[in-house]
Image (cartoon, grey):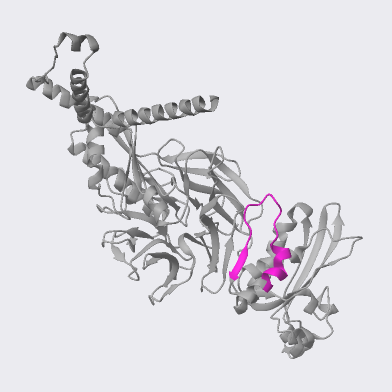
Amino acid sequence: MKQFTLVIIACFGLFLMQPAHSTLEIVITEGTDSARPVAVVPFHWFGEGESPYDFTEVVSADLLRSGRFKPVALSELPGLPSSDADITDYSAWARLGVEAVLVGTVDEFAPGRYEVTYQVIDPLRGQITGGLSSYLQDEDLAFEQDHILDSRTSVVLDTQFRQYAHRISDVVYEALTGERGAFLTRIAYVFVDPDADLPYQLMVADYDGENERVLLRSPQPIMSPSWSPDGSQLAYVSFENRRAEIFTQDIYTTQREKLTSFPGINGSPAWSPDGKKMAMVLSKDGAPDIYVMDLESKRLQKITNHWRIDTEPSWTPDSNTLVFTSERGGRPQLYRVDLDTAKVRRLTFNGEANLGGTVSPDGRSLVVVNQTNGRFHIARQDFPTGNFQELTQTSLDESPSVAPNGSMIIYSTTYQNRQVLALVSMDGRFQARLPSREGQVKSPAWSPFL
Amino acid sequence: MQHKTVMKGVILSASMLFLAACSSTSDESTVDERRSAEAGSQQSIGSGATESERRRGVETGAADRVLTPEEERAQAREERQQRYADLRQEQTLYFDFDDASIRGEFAELLAAHADYLTRNPSVTVVIEGHTDERGTPEYNIALGERRAKSVVDYLQSLGVSSRQMSVVSYGEERPVVRQSNERAWAQNRRAILVY
């Protein structure tokens, strides 16, 4: 297994290399053996010299990182077609075992603008129909190319090549899985460089670690970034005034607003899926309790009231229920509270404790930090079956955040005495590390679809 | 020949260093020890009297002074103040894993701070709560606050006004030792009194 992983890393090392400015890179550690092979053929460039951008490099890396697919090495491909019309023998591609073939072309449209055309082809279907399937329609014989799963043409600005490459990945992923791709998403996280003047930094980067930007640098800790459902704002906790306070910040305009500054804990902000409310933890009345603030009126509603710790609120997709961590049963466990009836029900029972719960976008599973035998791992519990599965084997795992398509979890873990981010697929098969060259990286939050 | 004098010099200065070292250790000894040492030196003056005194054949001695109860109390108070001042230099107390109860070994440390705060009601203190990295950051913020609050409760029981104290929990965000082992964790599970 390990050897196999190494080979894969070597093969795709090219794709995974990042320019020097980015802090994160991705090392896949587990799960490439269960991925399905696909063929990603470099797009044909009609112009002179080198192609202005290598779209398929980005697409291959995206598909590999999804944990679902394994792009076949270029040397194994039976040819380098640029469109379906170039493929004469579908069986050669079918024999390769690939589920799909991505082909395409790039042509100069105007200065700085390029026309990109691509097709996603199912070689097995192509083998059966010979590239043209016939059926009867109104007693006439009609033909269609149903082996072409998707086909698109766009004019792309040269400044948006990378973004467009992620869009292609989304199309391929959706054509093959029936589920929306999450390649055009971002992650927010906290970077800590203890030696820097301003050691605590709130960062935003593309989901793959590219285009990293600093949103806030501070001499004091920053915690708990949470995305607004439209992906334009972050809520977070900052200790810049030597106390915990909740802020919101527009990630494009840098405009900030201080939301709360009560005595004691102001923590764990979580934007409701409808964007109207913010769940949070306040300890102004003594013990930490869950509150919901109406963002327009700023009115606070106390949701839980218990003398022991209640924290880590997470919304269900319908905005009617919160899942939270509570010590009311002795050790921290997850509970859910109905916001209309205030009824509380315990959800988790496995191991010594369960914390940091987050509900998957389809509302069908709960991702938690499970403590068993003193070790902290990411686990998934399904509704309503109660099926419980431990997903990670890394150490001191915390802060799980689920991709908006529910395919992947990003979390914080400790590797070689440093906090790093890591990825695990929802079924636990695919695992990767995102090591940072320096400092500590923590509190990841996966953005909604952008 | 010159060699020998140099050697003598070295030995002399070495022994002086040794003496200096001895006397410096007695500086660190408690006040009680210092007092008995002083008494001892008085006696030695008696026995090792000067040449002129010996010629006259008279020796003088001194008895220990008897302190009035008031003086005794004042002295004890002074000693305690000194000890408390020393203790107050220490502002950090440590906790067991996932626990916020004050360990017995920190009782005197907190007594020293309480004494200072009750005698100086205008002084305020911020009590910071910290945790090790195990558990989630949000839970650790709550645990850090519980630690800081248990220090507040303890100081309040010693007569410190709640108006003088405020609490901030940094959870696992500001470790003193950025490592993942028992030793580092033990040093990071702490509360700090910040004046």
Q: Does the magenta-highlighted stretch encompass residue A26?
A: yes
Task: Please provide the residue range marked out in magenta.
Answer: A7-29
- Give the vertical position of A177 relative to B153 (above or below): below
Left or right, A65 with respect to B32, comes to: right
Place residue A284 in its image quadrant: top left
Residue at the right extreme? A48
* Image quarter (top left, top right, bottom left or bottom right) of the N terminus of chain A: bottom right
Give whichever of A395, A274 is nearer the camera. A395
- Give the vertical position of A327 relative to B7 (above or below): below
* Residue A132 visible in rendering: no
Place residue A7 in its image quadrant: bottom right
Give whichever of A246, A431 is nearer the camera. A431
- Give the vertical position of A353 relative to B100 (above or below): below
Place residue B106 in its image quadrant: top left
Q: Does the magenta-highlighted stretch encompass residue A205?
A: no
Q: Residue at x 73, y 89 (%)?
A: A135
